Structure formats: structure tokens, C-alpha cells
Image (cartoon, rainbow, N blue to C red):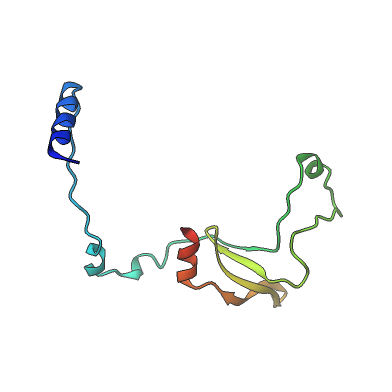
Amino acid sequence: MNQSSENALSTQAAKNGEQRLEFDTLNEGAGETADVSLDMILDVPVTLAMEVGRTRISIRNLLQLNQGSVVELDRAAGEPLDVFVNGTLVAHGEVVVINEKFGIRLTDVISPAERVRKLR
């Protein structure tokens, strides 16, 4: 923005009783020089979810579900589960049973670079 445009905006803002705010310029590399300690975030809780599959059904069909109903999913038997952390896919895995409890063995972890690429 040139100087005359800035002056025109300042004049208009002053007439409307508004104040003009000035912000410091952010430097791209400014955060890189600061010491970042991961200890601050290690105890932050996150939601871990395993997804067997998905399907879309109408509300009419949903209301007709009862005990013993079978819902077909979009995934074949034996395919790996998706593992999500706060809604972001982070891995694939398979179901295991240990001491009569279900668990998941991770078979493929999505790289951090790939996760960031998918966010864009």
C-alpha cells in the first residue's frame, strides 16, 4: 500500500472515530531461534480413535436398526484399521487381543511430513 492510500485510510478512520492499529512485521525465521521445549505439551490429552470402516445410511434405515442388525462398511475383512489422533490419520493397524482386551498393533505409521502435506 502506498503512502497516499495509507493517509486516506487514516483520515477516513479518524472521521468514523476509529483507531488505526500498527503491527510489527513477523519474521519467517523468528520462531526457529527460540528454544522450544516439548516438555510443555507432553501431558496434553489427545483423542485416539480407531476406525474399522464407514458407511452412509438414511435416517429411515438408521431408525430401523435393532439388535442383530448388520451394517455393511466400506472396507473388506482383513483390511487394516485407520488410527486417528484428534481427527487426523496417523497410522494403520490390525486388531489384537491381549489378556482378553482389544488393542491395535500399528503396521504403518504416516510420516510427519506426509501428515503436514495432507493438511494443506
Left or right of 42? Residue 1 is left
Image quarter for residue 62? top right
Answer left or right for 50 relative to 119: right
19 and 5: which is toward the camera: 5
Relative side of 84 to 117, left or right: right
* Residue at image coords 35%, 70%: 38
Estimate the x, y position of residue 48 in percent, counting from the top left: 56, 63
Residue furthest out toward the top: 15
The quarter holding residue 27 reads: bottom left
| Position in image of residue 98 (x %, y %) | 69, 78
**In the picture shown, does residue 62 fall above or below 33?**
above
How many labels, in total?
Answer: 0
* Residue pictured at 46% horizontal, 58% vertical: 120
The quarter of the picture where residue 81 lies is bottom right
The image shows residue 85 at horizontal and vertical percentages of: 53, 63
State the residue at coordinates (84%, 43%): 64
Q: Residue at x 22, y 63 (%)?
A: 30
- Which image quarter is the N terminus in? top left
Which residue is at the front of the view, 99 or 57?
57
Q: Position of residue 78 (x, y in %)?
A: 76, 73
In the rendered view, tell whether residue 4 sits above or below residue 46: above
